[in-house]
Amino acid sequence: MMRRPRATTCKVSQYKDMDPDMSFPQTISSDEDSEEWSPSEPKSKAPSKTASAPAAGERKAAAKRTVKPKQPKAPKEPKAPKMPKEPKAVKPRAPRKPAAERKPRVPAARKDSGGSGLAGTKRKKDDKAGEDKGEKQTDGTEGWRAEESGPSISMKEERVSFIVSGANEADRWADEGSSLGGLRAKKEEVEEEDFTFDEPCLKKQKTSRASLGRPTALPSAVAQALLNELNMNWNLQELVSILTCVEKWVCVNIIGLLREENTVPFMVRYRKDLINHMDADAVRDVQLVYEELCTLAKKTQSVIQTLKKDGVLTTELEQNLRSCRSADDLDHVYSPYKKGSKLTKARKAKALGLEVAASALMETPHTLDLQTWVKPDTQGLSSVEEVATGVEHILADMIAKDPETLTYVKTLCENSFVTIQSSVSKSALKGKEQEKTDPSRRKPGAQQNKNMDIDKFHLYSDFTNNIQRIQAHQTLAINRGESLKILTVKVNISDRVKSDFTRWCINNRWRPKTFARQELHAIIRNAVEDSYKRLILPFLTRSYRTKLTVAAEKESIAMFVRNLRQRLLVSPIRGCIVLGVDPGFRHGCKLAILSPTSQILYTDVVYLHNANQPKEAEKLRHLMTKYSCTKVVIGNGTACRETESFFADLISRRYFHPLDVSYCITNEAGASIYSVSPEAVKEMPDLDPNLRSAVSIGRRVQDPLAELVKIDPKHIGIGTYQHDVSAGALKAALDGVVQECVSFVGVDINICSEILMRHVAGLNVGRAKSIAEWREQKGPFINREQLKLVKGMGPKTFQQCAGFIRINPQTLHSLKTSPHPEPSVPEKPAAKKGKGKTSVNVSTSFNPLDQTCIHPESYHVAQRFLSFVGGSADQIGTAGLRQCVESKVKTSSAEELARTLDTTSETLKLIIDGLTQPPGFDIRQNFGQADFKRGIVSMSDLRVGAVLTGRVDNTALFGAFVDIGVGRSGLIHKSNITLDKLPVSQRRRSLALGPGERVEVRVLNVDPQRGRIGLDLIRVLE
């Protein structure tokens, strides 16, 4: 069953609908999942309706350029004053247009080899955009900066990595003129397409904001270097643009920035104009695709060298290898030539010299006589039947590797009903039957566990689903069952595909050029059928399984990323003493009292769940009173509910009076692992590992980011199927999120831990250690410039990390007044440094701008702006300076001020934020804090209709489990998770709700006997 075409909505409108306070936009599809539960019409009709008018418009525009190159000047003058200077950049690209025009003439091959319908649309859009905008290249670092020209660019507000629309994007479409109007039509055409595996996932990139003068090609030196490195038959920038759905000029800039060793946080905050205000997740997606293509190019080169050594490399084979756009395509072409693999039937036939006969069959069949190829003494040529069979094998191999043929069969599959089916494997059933009939033969260990696991996969014992509708967690579960040899999986393709494919091959693609006798037609038919059954069908099955797995892994990793970001950016609880409790029964509850700065004041063990409760309660009251502790943090592990009940009872009896004590429950996942780690031993050498867990639990509420970065993200208890996805991809994604969060929050370089410093953009373990050693030997850093004196801190490293490092004046003052073995930094520590350090001249005075998010490269602009508004650096964060800035911005727009100060509007916006934010500003203050309470709620207290808030604890096929604080999670059935209750950014498949999501729910029913609570979703809390 095919889905109906979705209502087309421009990507820009999705950004406009996004709530400004949304924390981080996830990697979302531009479709809204309204079609998730509704049937649809065949999608193949939609493109033909929407594409005809724009295509005609493009052909007209192309004809004008071909005849009169100077003609575009007139219609483009209203766009921007610089357009009359652009035709020189247009002329060299003009010859490319006719090639783009010819693409719609071959409907059957609208997808390129390894590409998709979207790829063709994207390529035409890129060509159109490239000709309309022109190219601009400059030398040096400024080559990546685009000039400020054309209509004013609305500002975007950056908090960590989320993107907020600041103006009506519909006006932007109008400003871009007729050429961008054509692009808009193309984008809507793409969005009517449903999800297919050859099309990349449509994401949220706002690529409509491309302004005139943006570079659309890498500088010649960089482009030549890339060409020499890759040596492939495709253009890297264009292919990255197609696969990521990001405009080419943005991909060009990102690739250039990555090659210059820029980090993602640095690009997102300080190079917004080059990356088109994309968020960190979107930039990482582009980075991942770029790295995958580079890896593919290297692997292709290695394969070519191997085949050359083996003497089997031909010009045609080399071109086929260099045209591969994915590892799957490369494997398909290379697999017959791999060492150790059996000699294929086609290669055996070619070795007998039958390739000439196969060519003759297609080119000049009237001259082919198979009898002349018969050699009675040669195996494989002893009869006409054997010769015919050899020719069939060669033709089958040619058909299976023909790009146009593969594109056509993929198109047929997309328009047919393709399903994935799983069932219990024969070996698993046999083992289970043996266990039932003869329990004495039960095998110990792994085999017994395997038999027990069969019940876990009961949902997939007879499972069938359309490949376009299968959920990511279902794919991963099926893969896990298959790897355990519990499930058998196969892909079912309609028989209609085979019949249509055979008919097309015989009558069109593989039809002989001249008259062929009936027996030769029979050879071609047999070859087509053999190719489909023996070669193409297994290739399609592998392709579908691979794409399903890749898509599911990306979904799973995206859930990990989102949940980790939410966990790291929980707002800290500052300025209070905290009691961390690691609950337990037999070994007691471990206590750790922490100062407001997370210093350990006291540790102990109390036994709250035995006969000595009154005595232990008295000890608790004494400690709480002695240290004036009013906040209790309880881990959610063993004995959590009993410990919570104990504290709730004491609080209800005002046992700690006059202290107003409250408590919260926090996730303790990873605390025990961290307690025995080398970092914990180094930090708390004299403390018992069990007490270290209590310290970690308390610090997770005081400063979640600083504490959780010490733990491997995989152990924090987030996401699902972490063992079923690529370990390397998961680690890279999670490390990137940690770096992003730490960088955007910023670190006080004089008090932050060495572990936290490692995750700042541009720093690593060695550089963080060097900074910590410098700080211990020389005293606190007075300004950011002193970082240049640290070993290993070169210009590039300083550029990447400087904007994320803070020099807090209060911290600096307290460290200066406290006794220290060394005085402040001497004038010439650079004398003992290596290359490049002796010439560094660094000031030893405090710079007020060092406490802001303003990058040192923009200090001169910030100083000019301060002079312009009549303020000074000493007024940073004060109400007076804020009023001066606001009044100046009201009278003059940000764009006008930026032109006056000779900078970009993005840089000016960042400078304004840095100057007006109050001292000690923390982006986490806009995120939720830990929920402290004074009493416990039980299931008996729940009433039908009650509205509660909770946090998603887990998700399943049938719904989401929500912890509402009663000791038992309630279930929101999937029928109650409707699109109108979800934010726009979360209206997609398996990421609609995820662990850690805060929700508002209504109680539908309570079943105390069975311990079940039914909930209805009201809304997702931001």
Image (tube, grey):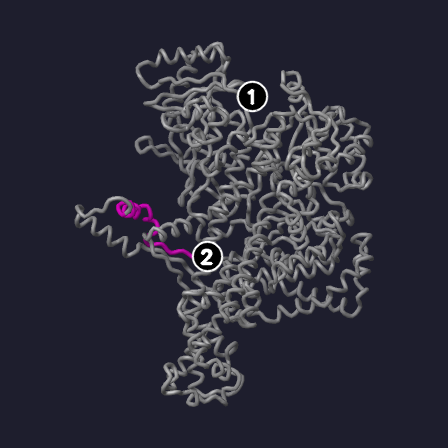
Where residue 266 sits, quadrant-wise, is: top right
Q: Secondary structure at mark 1?
A: loop
Q: Which residue in the structure is indicated by mark 2?
A: 546
Q: Nearer the viewer, residue 687 or 465?
A: 687
What number is the disc on residue 961? none
The residue at 82%/28% (across/down) is: 870
Where residue 750 sits, quadrant-wise, is: top right
18 relative to 436 in the view: left or right: right
The residue at 48%/24% (across/down) is: 684
The residue at 72%/37% (across/down) is: 909
Stretch in magenta: 447-466
Give how far across and how far down residue 335 sits, in percent: 45, 65
**Which is nearer the N-term, disc 1 or disc 2?**
2
What number is the disc on residue 597? 1
Where residue 847 sits, quadrant-wise, is: top right
Instruction: Tell me which amino acid carries mark 1.
Output: Thr
